[in-house]
Image (cartoon, rainbow, N blue to C red):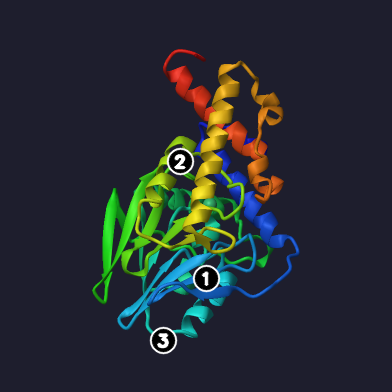
Amino acid sequence: MRSWEHRGKLWPVVWGWLWVFLVAVAAPQARATPTIQKIGPHLYAYISDNDGSSNSTFLVRADGVLVVDTGLDAQEGEKLLAAIRRISPAPVRYIVNTHYHPDHQGANGVVGPNAVVISTVFTREATLRLMTQMEKRGSQAGGQKFAFRPATLTFDKKITVHLDDEPVEIYATGPGHTMGDAVVYFPEEKSVATGDLFMNRSCPAMDKGSVKNWIHTLAWMLTLSAEHYVPGHFELGTRADVERFHAYLATLWEQVDAAYRAGVPIGEMGSHLRLSDYSDFRQFPRYQATFVDNAKHVYREIEAAKAGSGGRR
Ligand SMILES: [Zn+2]
């Protein structure tokens, strides 16, 4: 994962991710069953049974189903589709992908072979590059079958889908977990599908993006009239969980900024963190998702911004 250091280039980062996913999927895991929770009059949260494949959110109306994120591969997609079919026989008409990472969209072709696939422009372009690279490298490794379907409908700022007259608001929130994340708001269900911009009680993995804008995006999510927040991974979140995750990133930013101003080198950031309020947060060295990994990411972002405006102070 040294390639993570090359912040200026997308491809090393993508390959870092891909490596993580292949390892995650190849690793033996306790196979539980996914949890399906009804969180609104017509909305369901699908909480994945493993951390190598994302959570999903699906809206079921008579006319059809809208799914946010589909999981890692064909096998995960079949599990999600079976869960949807236990609730409704209606066709999957729309898929929304929150970002380009394979664990969120590698099952599009299984879950919705005929669905309109919606994403930001960045996510579509990154997906096409990812597919090309995987084809060149012949990366259908370990019998794993990816079923990518890049977006057939892209948007810049906001797009609203009306399913049986129920509005689903999809927002491009700018750089955050990646350079082009999307957040889905279901106003009539009082729920938000956050993608990896929110991880319940966990340090997030950070691709090339912006932690600064990520913190703004979380604050904006909290202005929405919502009770349930479906995270990209792990258990369903409440408003209080999102507030806490927002506070973690904001606190981390403050501490790293203070250390940076005091001239602390990046390699010593770990000993300057005071994050005992968040000691219950999961940390994943293999996903480069620990307090220190997150701190280094923030440090580099501050450094890049300061370099752009003429120095450390
Ligand atoms: Zn992700």
Query: Disc 1 vs disc 3: Cβ atoms closer than 8 Å?
Result: no
Q: Give the image location of residue 197, x and y in percent.
A: 48, 50
Q: Earlier in the sequence, mark 1 or mark 2?
A: 1
SS type, badge 3:
loop
157 relative to 207 in the view: left or right: left
The amino acid sitting under disc 1 is Tyr
290 relative to 130 in the view: left or right: right
The amino acid sitting under disc 2 is Ile
Asked whether 260 or 179 is in front, the reply is 260
Residue at the spot x=67%, y=61% of the render? Answer: 25
For disc 3, the marked residue is 89
- Figure quadrant of residue 88: bottom left
* Residue 77 visible, this angle: yes
* Residue 299 visible, this angle: no
Residue at the spot x=61%, y=51% of the render? Answer: 202
Task: Name above or below for residue 250 compared with residue 85.
Answer: above
Q: Give the image location of residue 225, x and y in percent.
A: 35, 59
SS type, badge 1:
strand
Numbered label attached to residue 46: 1
For disc 2, the marked residue is 215
291 relative to 187 in the view: left or right: right
Density class for disc 1 (Cα within 10 Å; few <14, some 14-19, many ≥20) is many
